[in-house]
Image (cartoon, helix red, strand yellow):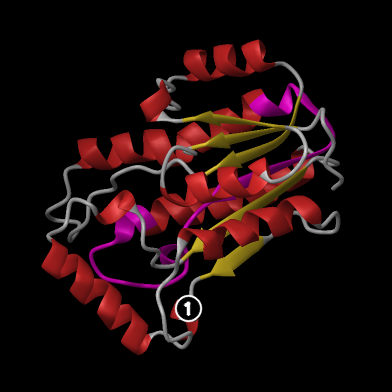
Amino acid sequence: MTFNNNTVSVVIGGTSGIGAAVARALMQRPGRVEIASRATGLDIADSTAVAAYFRKLGPIDHLIVTAGSAAPGGKISDIDLGTAKAAFDVKFWGSVVLAREAARYMRAGGTITFTSGFLARRTVPGTFVKTAMNAALEATAKVLAKELAPLRVNVVSPGLTQTEAYAGMTGEARDAMFDRAAATLPAGRFGQPEDIASGYLFAIDNPFVTGSVIDIEGGALIS
């Protein structure tokens, strides 16, 4: 995909973490980068607000969705279903609504790239909400790649990445988690936002990639 001064890329969740890394990379290219997130006032669980956002933006070329949600963990007997449904409203349904509304304004050659996570295809007890949410998003992206063609729709699936997402943990617990990952992952390290950002650029740049899940997880799926 050739970028020019009229290219408009929209990064949802672009104020922190992986989304911010994607936005920084896109800012090195010609064109305009629009960033939206909860921090900027956009609630992607609000379909009316999402529709108004894209109506105001007008024609766009690329949509990158990195916005996530705080999915509850634990055994099914302990999960609060209200909290689980709220997580789906943001991560899954929010992504679907973003794609629906953005596609109305997307120019020829446009792309939509979602974000899932390696738990979509790795069985870990206590993570069924994240697993179901991300697996649903990966399956939906493949359907949308057919429905919205010739627009291209893909998914980037990150592994453990050092971002603000883990700010709620104690420093000791967070360091232990990253140290454990570096010791056990085949890549010998945990991810950085820039590592993951390269996957979104690949999905945008390669015109022969659609309906794909791009795994960037340090080998977690083969461990």
Which of the 4 quarters of the picture holds residue 184? Answer: bottom left
Q: Give the extent of the magenta segment.
A: 102-130
Crowd rating for badge 1 (residues with CA inside 10 Å; few <14, some 14–19, many 20+):
some
Note whether 13 is above or below 221 in the view shown. above
The residue drawn where x is 72% and y is 16% is 58
Is residue 37 shown above or below 132? above
Residue 165 in the image, given as x and y percentages of width and height: 31, 51
Q: Give the quadrant of residue 206.
A: bottom right
Q: How many marks?
A: 1
Residue shown at 44% from the left, 69% from the top: 191
Q: Does the magenta run of residues contain 114?
A: yes
Question: Is residue 120 something one can see in this rendering?
Answer: yes
Q: Please indicate whether residue 205 sits to the left or right of residue 197 in the image.
A: right
The residue closer to the viewer here, 99 or 126, is 99
Disc 1 marks which amino acid?
A: Leu
Nearer-the-camera pick, 59 or 163: 163
How far across and down, in percent of the image, does residue 57 sit? Answer: 66, 17
Give the residue at x 30% y 34%. 86
Q: Quadrant of the C terminus?
A: bottom left
Residue 119 included in the magenta stretch of the image: yes
Q: Identify the residue at image location x=49%, y=81%.
A: 219
Answer yes or no: is residue 211 visible. no
Disc 1: which residue: 221
Q: Does residue 198 sit above or below 12 in this rendering?
A: below
Between 56 and 144, the one lying in front of the other is 56
Horizontal side, residue 88 vs residue 94: left or right: left
Specify the farthest residue to the front.
28
Q: Is residue 117 left or right of residue 215?
A: left
Secondary structure state at the residue bearing disc 1:
helix
